[in-house]
Image (tube, grey):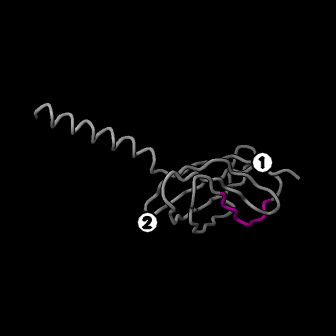
Amino acid sequence: MTGRSCLLFGFLLVLLLAAAGCTTLSVGNVSYGAGNLTVKITNNRDPVDTGIQVRIYKLNEFEQHELLTTGTTVTLTGTDNTVTIPLRLDPGRYKIYVYLTTNGQRETAVIRDITVKL
C-alpha cells in the first residue's frame, strides 16, 4: 500500500468507528407507577420503528418466577424517548428484561431491578 492509500484507509476506518457509536439504541431508566411500566430509550440516529419486548420476573427471597411477557412496537424519534406499557404489578421486587429489536435484529438487551411499593 502506498502512503496515500494507507491514509485513505485510516480515514475510512476512523469514520466507520465514529459512526458506529451513533447508530445504537440504549435503554435507560425503567420504572413503575400509576399502573404503567415506563422505559426510557435513547436513539442516536434517525427515527426508527423498534420492537420492545419486556419480560417481568417476580423476586421472592432466593427465587424468581416469570410473571408475564409483553411487548409493543414504537417509533423512536429524537434522542430521548419514553415508552409506557400499561400493566398491573403488586408491591414487591421485580427483575425486568428489556429487549429492543429493529428489522428483526436484536439491538440491545438489558436487565433492570425495580421495587414496587404500596
Q: Could you tell me residue 66's position as x and y percent?
A: 66, 59
SS category of the residue bearing label 1: strand
The local crowd at label 2, few if under 14, some if 14 to 19, many if 20 or more residues have their Cα within 10 Å, is few
Q: Which residue is mark 1?
A: 115
Quadrant containing the N terminus in the rendered view: top left
Looking at the image, which residue is at 70% across and 64% down?
A: 85
Residue closest to the eye, 81 or 28: 81
Q: Which residue is mark 2?
A: 103
Q: Is residue 88 magenta?
A: yes
Q: How many numbered discs?
A: 2
Q: Could you tell me residue 32's position as x and y percent?
A: 76, 55
Q: Could you tell me residue 41's position as x and y percent?
A: 60, 53
Query: Mark 1 is on which residue type?
Result: Thr
Looking at the image, which residue is at 57% across and 62% down?
A: 52
Q: Residue 71 vs residue 32: left or right?
A: left
Looking at the image, which residue is at 66% across and 55% down?
A: 39
The local crowd at label 1, few if under 14, some if 14 to 19, many if 20 or more residues have their Cα within 10 Å, is some
Q: Could you tell me residue 36's position as x and y percent?
A: 76, 62
Of circles 1 and 2, which is in front? 2
Looking at the image, which residue is at 63% across and 56% down?
A: 81
Q: Residue 64 vs residue 50: left or right?
A: right
Residue farthest toward the top in the current orientation of the protein: 3
Q: Is residue 41 magenta?
A: no
Q: Residue 3 vs residue 97: left or right?
A: left
Magenta part of the protein: which range? Answer: 82-89
Query: Mark 2 is on which residue type?
Result: Asn
Q: In the picture shown, does residue 79 fall above or below 17?
A: below
